[in-house]
């Protein structure tokens, strides 16, 4: 086995020093070894400047894994984890949570063991032979124009109403993620250029435009917001920065007031709606990819496929062939 801490076994130093260091290493319990490895992984991701949300995401996946080990009385060091244990864990995640959760757990553990493999802590990545989790292709749900009209109609002229109208129009117009909208600062708005400086996934910054309707709603909100100590753009009625959990509550409350049912309503539904409406209105997938901050066209193509249904419906309505006068034929004809 590749030793867990090869730095203790360099060519320099005395045999006594090596033996002393080995003894210290062996005193750690398997659970301590696992905890230290996980802590090291999280520190490495912080050093890579991963966002706080990404770090929390990793912590939650590791928490689920360590709870699984504890529930099955498995006290293991990282190099003792086998592919079968990983499979059992992912199966339990898929059954008790969802295939998507199991998929994300697999991605986290794969990255974790790849780091350990690179550092010589393990001989191989146990996930190398673990099959990927099959995920069901979910339906992308969007708001209709009638839904949007009903949602905006629930907003009055009080502070929450003016704020929520600005939020919904900005989400619809820009396709921002919930965390991106909550992370906006006053200084991120370029009023003349009608753009936002957005910090997206992986701490990647991009410029996102917004239209005149969203601009007017933002100006109305800014006037009601006034001067506050916080630099965050969107705040609660108690003048603290809005977070994505409170944002979700706001959207659910508005959809309840608008009596919208039959679809899952969340801030991300506005992102889906923005993408589909953008393509329906003549936008292209490449500019949409930049707008949404996608690293590749995989998800953007799904939006394109959904908007393509419009073409099918329009063709059935305006089919050139079906518009031709129908000729009546009588009797049998001999094929030539």
Image (tube, helix red, strand yellow):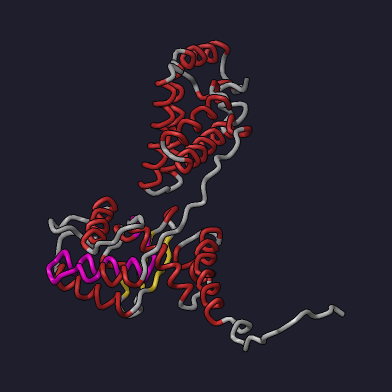
Specify the quadrant of the image occupied by residue 183: bottom left
Q: Which residues are magenta?
A: 152-180
- Name the residue furthest front: 331
Front in this rendered view, residue 242 or 23: 242
- Name the residue furthest bottom: 325
Asked if residue 30 is positioned above or below residue 215 in the image, the reply reads above
Q: Is residue 258 left or right of residue 323?
A: left
* Residue 176 x %, y %: 37, 63
Whether residue 271 appears in this view of the structure is yes
Front in this rendered view, residue 294 or 155: 155
Residue 82 inside the magenta-drawn segment = no
Q: Main secondary structure of the magenta part?
A: helix
* Residue 247 x %, y %: 26, 56
Whether residue 5 appears in this view of the structure is no
Residue in view at x 41 percent, y 58 percent? 200
Q: Is residue 13 left or right of residue 153?
A: right
Asked if residue 70 is positioned above or below residue 114 in the image, the reply reads above
Asked if residue 26 is positioned above or below residue 204 in the image, the reply reads above
* Residue 301 x %, y %: 55, 63
* Residue 53 x %, y %: 36, 47
Quadrant (top left, top right, bottom left, bottom right) of the C terminus: bottom right
- Count of numbered labels shown in the rendering: 0
Residue in view at x 58 percent, y 12 percent? 15
Residue in view at x 41 percent, y 59 percent? 141
Q: Is residue 67 left or right of residue 159?
A: right
Asked if residue 14 is positioned above or below residue 194 in the image, the reply reads above
């Amino acid at each position: 086995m590749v030793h867990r801490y090869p730095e203790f076994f360099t060519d320099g130093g005395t045999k006594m020093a090596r033996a002393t260091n080995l003894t210290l290493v062996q005193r750690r319990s398997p659970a301590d070894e696992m905890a230290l490895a996980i802590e090291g992984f999280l520190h490495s991701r912080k050093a890579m400047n991963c966002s706080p949300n990404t770090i929390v995401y990793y912590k939650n996946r590791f928490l689920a894994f360590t709870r699984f080990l504890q529930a099955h009385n498995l006290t293991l060091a990282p190099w003792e984890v086998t592919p079968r244990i990983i499979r059992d864990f992912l199966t339990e995640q898929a059954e008790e949570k969802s295939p998507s959760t199991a998929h994300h757990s697999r991605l986290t553990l794969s990255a974790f063991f790849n780091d350990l493999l690179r550092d010589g802590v393990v001989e191989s990545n146990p996930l190398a032979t673990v099959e990927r989790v099959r995920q069901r292709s979910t339906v992308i749900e969007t708001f209709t124009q009638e839904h949007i009209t009903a949602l905006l109609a629930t907003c009055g002229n009080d502070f929450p109403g003016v704020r929520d109208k600005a939020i919904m129009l900005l989400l619809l117009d820009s396709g921002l993620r919930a965390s991106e909208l909550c992370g906006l600062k006053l200084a991120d708005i370029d009023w003349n250029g009608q753009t936002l400086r957005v910090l997206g996934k992986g701490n990647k910054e991009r410029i996102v435009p917004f239209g005149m309707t969203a601009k007017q709603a933002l100006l109305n909100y800014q006037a009601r917001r006034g001067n506050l100590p916080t630099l965050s753009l969107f705040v609660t009625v108690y003048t603290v920065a809005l977070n994505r959990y409170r944002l979700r509550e706001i959207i659910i409350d508005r959809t309840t007031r608008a009596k919208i049912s039959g679809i899952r309503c969340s801030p991300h539904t506005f992102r889906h709606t923005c993408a589909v409406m953008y393509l329906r209105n003549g936008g292209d997938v490449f500019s949409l990819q930049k707008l949404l901050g996608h690293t590749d066209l995989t998800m953007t193509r799904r939006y394109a496929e959904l908007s393509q249904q419009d073409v099918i419906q329009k063709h059935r309505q305006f089919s050139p062939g079906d518009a031709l006068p129908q000729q009546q034929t009588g009797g049998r004809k001999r094929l030539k």
